[in-house]
Image (spheres, grey):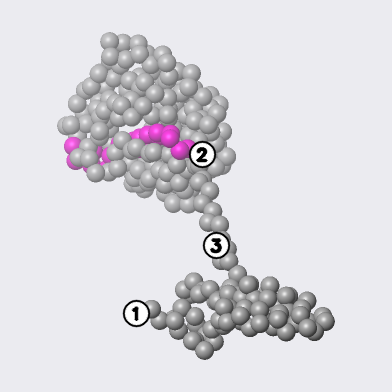
Amino acid sequence: MFDEDEQYPGGRHARQDPVGRRGLLKAALVVAAAVPGLAVLADHLLRRGHDVTAPQAAPAGRSPQSPPVNRPLVSRPTQVVLPLAGKVIVLDPGHNPNNIDHLAEIDRLINSGGFLKACNTVGAETDAGFPEWAFNLDVARRARVILRSQGAQVIMTQNGHTPYGPCNNRRAWISNHAHADATIAIHADGGPPEGYGFAALVPLLVISSISDNKAIIKPSGELGEATVRQFAQATGEPLSTYLGADGIQERNDLCGLNLSTVPKIFIECANMRNASDALKVTDPTWRDAAALGIANSIKAFVLR
């Protein structure tokens, strides 16, 4: 049943009757005709009477006097494009913590680009017994964090969980299959005790029945040059005193470079047999710097 008191909030007695008011005003016109000046007033009141209407019910939750609600504009957050977004990077930490328990497997000979060479090796160590594989793997993991934070997809050839290796030809296949924009094999050398410093090992041309690395010679050289600059800046490590010249050594005896079809280099971050360099590779803070130098080298190369 219709309830007037709900339709008109002031209640039934608060409602004005416009029809009754008009009737009274019309009657007043008759009287006004006999009284000068009153007719004008009565006509004015009659016209106003047509505008007398019942108040409209206010929408739920809003008073009749409430201004329109202005809803704030919702802005979408700006999408940040990371510098290495869409780039595929392969980090190849040399050797493996389990190689020592699989000597027969890692001694197996594989075709390394026209010649036979061992599948893998146990790597070097400091005079105090700190193993190269531990350095390589730790630096690779730290570099992976940096590269991922900049948007890169990072693949590691091994993360310490495989029984051994993988063999060097398999490491090259991982990079090739991923169509990597850049690959760095991370190592620390076991050179002459009097030698120190770091070097980038870059490929020489090797064409064989299973390899042709001609297409990567130039870009790999550019990756090596970027590494010389960036690694030195991040770590303060001098250029090698015994490997190559000006921090670059060309090689045609490394399976990983010979079989690669994507830009790839090796970095010998330091000489583990040198007393000064041995202190660095065993220092986690220096390994942070080494990881940054490698990440910056890759970034400088792919964004060149």
Label 3 crowd (10 A; few <14 / some 14-19 / many >=20): few
- Determine the residue positioned at 80% across, 84% down: 35
Mark with earlier residue (3, 1):
1
From the top left corner, tell me how far across and down residue 258 is, in percent. Answer: 35, 19
Q: Are marks 3 and 1 in contact (CB under 8 Å)?
A: no
Q: Nearer the viewer, mark 3 or mark 1?
A: 1
Label 2 crowd (10 A; few <14 / some 14-19 / many >=20): some
Q: CA distance from mark 3 to mark 1?
A: 37 Å
Left-right relation of 15 to 208: right
Residue holding disc 1? 1
User: Foreground residue, 176 or 136?
Assistant: 176
Left-right relation of 44 to 175: right
Q: Amino acid at mark 2?
A: Pro
From the top left corner, tell me how far across and down residue 52 is, in percent. Answer: 61, 76
Mark with earlier residue (2, 3):
3
Q: CA distance from mark 2 to mark 3?
A: 37 Å
From the top left corner, tell me how far across and down residue 150 is, in percent. Answer: 47, 43
Q: Amino acid at mark 1?
A: Met
Residue holding disc 2? 83
Magenta residues span 83-102
Residue holding disc 3? 71
Q: CA distance from mark 2 to mark 1?
A: 70 Å
User: Foreground residue, 206 or 76?
Assistant: 76
Q: Which mark is residue 231?
A: none
User: Residue 87: within the magenta?
Assistant: yes
